Image (cartoon, grey):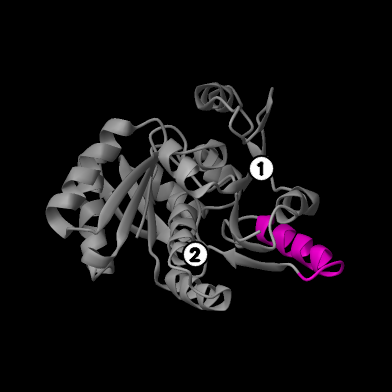
Amino acid sequence: MGCRIVADSSCDLSDELKEKMDIGLVPLKIDTENRSFIDDENLDIHELLTAMKDSEHGVKTSCPSPNDFLKEYEKSDNTFVVTLSSKLSGTYNSAVLAKNIMSEDNDKFIHVFDSKSASIGETLVSMKIFELIQKQYDKFDIVTKVEQYIDEMKTFFVLDNLDNLIKGGRLTKIAAHIASFLSIKPILGSDGDGDIKLYDKARGSKKVFRRFVEVVGEEGSDFENKVLGIAHCNAPEVAYELKEQFQEKYHFKDIIVVETAGLSTVYANDGGIVIAF
């Protein structure tokens, strides 16, 4: 039955990538004050954003059950799974538990990758797996190369609104204070182990995005052999303007732009930008 990629719904994909890679997406659940959403292809992002704005007490998300993953594992003899950071969600543990349950009854190959990221970071990990499958690498070589890719990947983001990250316990109150003081906007990123840290800050949107572009040069290298991913929440103009700036300055092998799906929308919030490379 070949190899197949499965990811949770934090893996943000364009229509082109969905068609090309045929990834099995396992949805998370999103609960606002008055509505519940399943993060699948039927979710309307604008309805979710409206419901989020109307929720005074924050938004809650629920990871998929092991049974949700089992349904996807049954579709292939060899499955590579990508989840959002285990430091941010129980999704990784759910995927691993499903793997252990499946392994009791058969000899299917299943490997679960902790992306140590989310959103476009998961997308890039999935793309790397797909690339290696297409090149017909051995499945164990794929595991080794993708784990190395995850360890070297950088993820950064700038958000207009930090409320859901704060209320969800995924951002320290110190960073929240900085964000609300004198229009200072933080540049946040992965700490290398899948948790969120404050990387830098700037006053105002123009300065923070200028600094955002500089950060890539400070933190990255060998751009000609790397793909940069940009995910945006209802902010296509900002995303494509950033794409042009990255193209002019760093000459990446490729730069892709995608819209955030439901889970990423919850935490990126309206106007949020996430990059990974």
In the rendering, at what x and y percent does residue 172 appear?
52, 55
**Residue 67 or 53: which is nearer the viewer?**
67
Q: What is the count of numbered marks?
A: 2
Q: Classify mark 2: helix, strand or loop.
A: helix
Q: Residue at x 74, y 67 (%)?
A: 108
Q: Residue 99 in magenta?
A: yes
**Position of residue 61 in the picture relative to residue 208 (left or right):** right
In the rendering, at what x and y percent does residue 247 appear?
17, 51
Highlighted magenta segment, given as a residue range: 90-107
Report the magenta stretch's main SS: helix
Q: CA distance from mark 2 to mark 1?
A: 26 Å
In the rendering, at what x and y percent does residue 221 appear?
24, 70
Q: Amino acid at mark 1?
A: Leu
In the rendering, at what x and y percent does residue 139 appear?
57, 73
**Residue 167 or 71: which is nearer the viewer?**
71
Of callouts 2 and 1, the N-terminal one: 1
Q: Classify mark 1: helix, strand or loop.
A: loop
Q: Amino acid at mark 2?
A: Ile
Q: Residue furthest left?
A: 248
Q: Quadrant of the N terminus?
A: bottom right
**Position of residue 140 in the picture relative to residue 124 (left or right):** right
Residue under pointer 2:
133
Q: Residue 22 in magenta?
A: no
Residue under pointer 1:
28
**Residue 200 or 93: which is nearer the viewer?**
93
Q: Are marks 2 and 1 in contact (CB under 8 Å)?
A: no
- Quadrant of the rendered image containing residue 161: top left
Q: Residue at x 49, y 42 (%)?
A: 18
Above or below, 1 relative to 207: below
Q: Quadrant of the C terminus?
A: bottom left
> Is the residue marked by circle 1 packed among few (<14), some (14-19), or many (20+) residues within 10 Å?
many
